[in-house]
Amino acid sequence: MSNPSSAPTLKTDTPEVPLELEPVSTHKSYTYENVRGWRQYRMLRPCRGMYHDVCRRLPYYWSDITDAFTYRTVASTIRMYFVNLLPAVAYTLDMYRRTGEFFGVTEALFSSALAAMVFSILGVQPLTIVGITGLISLFNYTIYDIILQYDISLYPSFMAWTGIWAAIFHWIVAIFNLCDYMRYVTDFSSESFGMYVGIIYMIKGVEELVYEFEQHGATAGYLSCIIAILYFASIYSLEKLGQSTVWVPWFRGILADYAYVFATLFWVGFSHIPGRLKDANISKVPVTQAFSPTQPRNWLLEFWTLPIQWVFVALPFGFLLMLLFYYDHNVSSITAQARQFPLKKPGGFHWDFFLLGCTTFVAGILGLPMPNGLVPQAPVHTDSLTNYTTELKIISTTEGEGTEIRRPIVKATAVVEQRVSHFLMGLALIGTMTGPLLTVLHTMPSALFAGVFFVVGWGSIESNSIVHRLVFLMSENRFIQRDEPLLQVRRRAIWLFIGLQGLGVVATVAISQTIAAIGFPVLIILLIPLRTHLMPRWFLLSELEVLDDFTCTNKQVLASLGGAPALPEHSKEEDWGLERRRSEQRFGLRRQRVGSIQR
Amino acid sequence: MSNPSSAPTLKTDTPEVPLELEPVSTHKSYTYENVRGWRQYRMLRPCRGMYHDVCRRLPYYWSDITDAFTYRTVASTIRMYFVNLLPAVAYTLDMYRRTGEFFGVTEALFSSALAAMVFSILGVQPLTIVGITGLISLFNYTIYDIILQYDISLYPSFMAWTGIWAAIFHWIVAIFNLCDYMRYVTDFSSESFGMYVGIIYMIKGVEELVYEFEQHGATAGYLSCIIAILYFASIYSLEKLGQSTVWVPWFRGILADYAYVFATLFWVGFSHIPGRLKDANISKVPVTQAFSPTQPRNWLLEFWTLPIQWVFVALPFGFLLMLLFYYDHNVSSITAQARQFPLKKPGGFHWDFFLLGCTTFVAGILGLPMPNGLVPQAPVHTDSLTNYTTELKIISTTEGEGTEIRRPIVKATAVVEQRVSHFLMGLALIGTMTGPLLTVLHTMPSALFAGVFFVVGWGSIESNSIVHRLVFLMSENRFIQRDEPLLQVRRRAIWLFIGLQGLGVVATVAISQTIAAIGFPVLIILLIPLRTHLMPRWFLLSELEVLDDFTCTNKQVLASLGGAPALPEHSKEEDWGLERRRSEQRFGLRRQRVGSIQR
């Protein structure tokens, strides 16, 4: 019970995990501060980041296994299996159709399992879940559309070379410590990215339903719409229920944690009720023989047969893929280690990005969709491993006796940091590739996956700060609490800020609908220099401090990125992220559900 | 801006409209207090209530017309036209099919228009909207099912006699001042009734969709489900938006007030989009020739041809119909004049119930569904005529500077009490009976009306106190504010209270599914003596004061019912309705939307 008379001020830091970060560059810490001469250029010191990443984490390896013997690991494994598998299948359905059935469910499962194995065993940060995203689907079918204009038989080996080039670029980035620049990523671009992904997913959901109409007729189409809408409504309601104060916290937790499990079991069953529902004959997830590629081919693509000029055409595509993963994977890793989680073990970006290069290489030559860090799922994994307590905060009011506000404050007490849940989830994915479980997968209606798109997409849109600020601007001023930090910002500055974000989102969504879709990572990445170089001229520093925040704020994480970013003059670290701090201090943590891309 | 330091206690009365109620029986006031001898028996003083009703209201008749020249009257007319017409058509679709197509849309429109004309011109309380309910539909088709077992050709004239007998009982009740007993109706029965109606409507909505599957096949069925679900979602969201603090109050008001209008226009249009949607060929509202009965018959039923024994069989049916209307009509009139509306003009129950007998008689002999007071629509009418202001209430908290609560408090400033909106709505209904507008009506898909059932039904369930108390019992105690009156009640007393209500609801819903459905008014009425005679033995008086409240609390209304009800010893009027008072005082009025049967 908090003391109602203590009125902490806004800028007070929440207590943090003590961290032994030494300020000068030693062999034990990774920083470029206070170093002179050639040593200050990170490009000249290859592998330094990777070396420090491994050194920092290796002492914890044994505890990563022994710490796992708790219920949370079991719960996390089940939850992450569904939360990883369902969206992966959803994206694959789309990719399957649009790449001439080259990438199928088997490939997606193989790729997810491969990534889970590699990152759970070898990754420095095993919390970061790696798998199939909707963006790799977009990437792959756009390449398909391009190759289709020349000679479609080149597609498999072209994809292999794209993967090989991308892998090479990954390794270069990792070796030359270039992940360090991720610390300059702010919410300006990461929230735009979240909005972009949300909109793309909503569109994908609708396309899935349209496809059902085209292939299976009106009856199947309408039934699919109903299943998609009600599946969405089920998960949404269960998660809302989890945030309420009915029943007891652990039971609410179960409802929200396993929302996907319950809703999926129910609606799959629903679609199989004999009679009218079964007769509608809606389409099911297409599966092929266990452990075999969807196409009649060997697993290893004959990439050495690609004509040499095409090998070099693949180079820029590989570069674009690396750009996408540079942003997407690292942001997902950052959010999995966000400040709100009381993590005690260090992470590492350079080493993990090197590993990602390896999985990209393997996925490329085996003809799998390349896996990368999953922005919504990675923080959900950490969330599923976190022990929360719901505390009661009593705030007296002057309204009369008994009218005090009794607010539930969710606090994170500890995270079960280990590798086992990730590993077990990977084993479960391999299990899903076997005959019997593929048959189970085949019973699931495609419509369900349209629902998955809606859940993930809408979650990302609803929780996006662009939307919140739009609502703020449209709200009646008199009902806004006076300590709202946005009130310190000129209204037109807010309009300009979300206007620029909106422009970025619209541009990216628009090109995603064309054959130029392949270039979308460039647009996302361009938002970073726009923010760092142009925007400080248009906004006051104090406004940017309210409107924007560094995406990477956890000191544990910054240790791998070479320390905190250089701030503008007169700006202090604790002046940033006022909105987040205020919200966390007064209302507690918002738990990470799968339906929200960004925190 | 309210003074945050003033902390009014709970039991303080909200200021009321001053009312010149003289305490003793004179020729000017209607009461049986302080009278002795035969005069204290209301049965012995026929027509006394009706006389006083008319005397009280007649002086305001001219102002009922002149007061109408404001925008509110226009807004109210449009809103009430939709809110009256759509449910009436929804109930009629059901009744049409289940009475061998005897009662059709024409009859429903005629009946609604007749009621609107009679009550707007002659009624003492023109705010009470009178029309077709779902219960009369249930009543009519249950009689159809019964007659079907004997000789279905008797149905029209049997219905006519049911109406005639019902009319006679209405007149008896009105003449012998029996409406007075309505003041003893408490929320125990009226909330049970609201729950019952809500559940029945949800069932009706589903039945409507099932029928679509049976008659028009799977494609039309599934599309109908989609339209019904999304129509429901549209209205629900618009009304929620109206309760938020985005945009400005008048704009929010328009969104919420015309939610039915916007949603109906949109979804009717949607169902007519050429291509797949139009091809699904979903069913439309069946209409017949303008101004003609649905069946090839004269308007006047040949009730004199009914065999004499059947005339007397109709007598108990007429009595049951009167019982239903006694409860339903009077409760709707009471809620239209609820305490929250600052009404200045008096109402009258005896006279209006006499009029209801007249409309029942006319509807009976013309073969129309009998109209009565519409529980959700009547208070919506008053709401639509009320000028609201949204005030800002600032409540300081001890959480720190700027953290005060800024709560929107809706207050009703005045009601435009007049007859014109009711009258114009009636004219519009007559207009709808003409050829061109019937054609417009025929473009509306039946699925929309399944959506109407869901809106009205769910609104009634969601706002029901049975649900709220169930949520209270299941909530974590520590998050409940200490001034919640329910905390003063033993938990098992709350369980028993809502258990008894639940039992009543379950019993009524259950018999509504059988041929004994006709008896449901008896069950509802039986809840009143259960409450007044048995329940005081099982509950403490202080508990009943929290759990229950008199449905009729407005002094203006009690003036027509012979004054406030006799209370148990040691109980004071201001001890009742603590929950409502607390809520209104702290959070302001909840505006009456059509989706909530009870206040």
Image (tube, coloured by chain):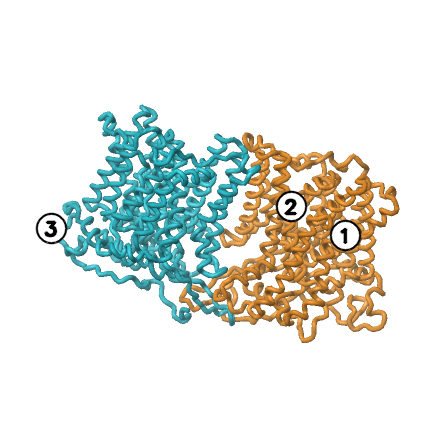
Chain colours: A orange, B cyan
Q: Which of the 4 image quadrants contains residue A184?
A: bottom right
In contact (CB < 8 Å): disc 3 and disc 2: no
Chain letter behind tag 3: B
Q: Secondary structure at mark 1?
A: helix
Residue A251, compared with residue B482, is above or below; it is above
Describe residue B239's horizontal placement relative to residue B570 as left or right.
right
Tell me where residue B301 appears, x and y as whole percent.
28, 31
Question: Disc 1 marks which residue?
Answer: A321
Question: Disc 2 marks which residue?
Answer: A204
Q: Secondary structure at mark 3?
A: helix
Q: Amino acid at mark 1?
A: Leu
Question: Disc 3 marks which residue?
Answer: B37
Q: Is residue A385 visible?
A: no
Q: Amino acid at mark 3?
A: Gly
Describe residue A72's horizontal placement relative to residue A250 as left or right.
right
Tell me where residue B526 appears, x and y as whole percent.
29, 41
Q: Secondary structure at mark 2?
A: helix
Q: Amino acid at mark 2?
A: Lys
Tell me where residue A580 appears, x and y as whole percent.
60, 64
Q: Are marks 2 and 1 on the same chain?
A: yes
Graded by Cα atoms within 10 Å as few (under 14), some (14 to 19) or many (20 or more), the crowding at tag 3 reads few
Q: Quadrant of the C terminus of chain A?
A: bottom right
Chain letter behind tag 1: A
Q: CA distance from mark 3 to mark 2?
A: 81 Å
